Image: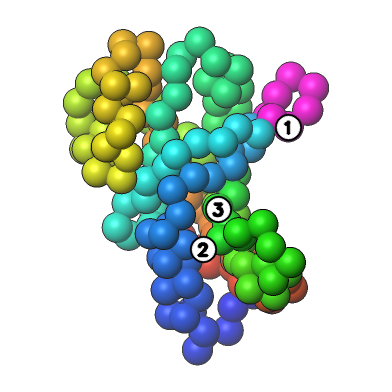
């Protein structure tokens, strides 16, 4: 748990990861096992929501439709030995609160600002924007320092 005097430092570390990393591992509940997917994501400025895009005819979308609670892992590793002491990993826990058309809207704009190269993907009528309301972030740094931040 974070101490009150560390809250801003932890918040800025989380903000930094959300700003510098473009991809997250999404974990959904599958029929028999958890299911992980790599997704490009964008975060709202207040860090309370994460958005990503997916096609409707995917296992990921079916899992999200059946169970809206998800976790996303965002990390700073570079696949080097030094990552054990240098990398940070951020888990975002949340719930899907909206599935929107990818043809318009503020979440689409946020996503495209972060991933302009995915405009053709969003133009597909089978693509939707998934919005996750984050309830908690768990930040692990230096291999074993763990901090939690509740999002209101």
The quadrant in which the N terminus is found is bottom right
Furthest residue to the bottom? 5
The 10 Å Cα crowd at callout 2, few under 14, some 14 to 19, many 20 or more, is few
Q: Report the Cα–Cα distance between label 3 and label 2.
A: 17 Å
Task: Give neighbour class at mark 1: few <14, some 14-19, many 20+ (Cα, 10 Å).
Answer: few
Q: Residue at x 41, y 59 (%)?
A: 20
Residue holding disc 3 = 74
* Picture layout, residue 6 above or below residue 150: below
The boundaries of the magenta stretch are 29-35
Classify mark 3: residues with Cα within 10 Å, few (<14), some (14-19) or many (20+).
many
Name the residue at 63% across, 37% down. 27
Give 118 or 36, whichever is nearer the viewer.
Answer: 118
Q: Quadrant of residue 101?
A: top left
Q: Of label 3 and label 2, which has the lower sequence position?
A: 3
Q: From the top left corner, tell me how far across and down residue 19 is, in percent.
A: 38, 59
Observer able to see residue 97 = no
Instruction: Give the spatial CA distance, label 1 vs label 2.
Output: 24 Å
Of residues 95 and 75, the one drawn nearer to the viewer in this rendering: 75
Give the structural element (helix, strand or loop) at label 2.
strand
Q: Nearer the viewer, residue 18 or 82?
A: 82
Q: Is residue 7 magenta?
A: no
Q: Which residue is label 2 attached to?
A: 150
Q: Which residue position is annotated with label 1? A: 34
Residue lying at the far right in this picture: please name it: 32
């Amino acid at each position: 748990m974070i101490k009150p005097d560390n809250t801003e430092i932890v918040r800025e570390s989380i903000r930094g990861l959300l700003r510098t990393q473009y991809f997250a591992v999404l974990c959904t509940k599958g029929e028999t096992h958890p299911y992980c997917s790599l997704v490009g994501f964008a975060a709202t400025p207040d860090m309370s929501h994460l958005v990503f895009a997916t096609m409707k005819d995917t296992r990921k979308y079916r899992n999200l439709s059946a169970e809206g609670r998800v976790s996303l892992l965002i990390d700073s590793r570079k696949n080097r030995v030094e990552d054990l002491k240098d990398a940070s990993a951020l888990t975002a826990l949340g719930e899907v609160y909206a599935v929107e058309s990818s043809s318009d809207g503020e979440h689409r704009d946020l996503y495209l600002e972060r991933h302009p190269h995915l405009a053709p993907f969003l133009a597909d009528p089978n693509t939707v924007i998934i919005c996750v309301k984050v309830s908690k972030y768990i930040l692990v740094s230096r291999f074993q320092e763990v901090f939690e931040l509740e999002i209101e």
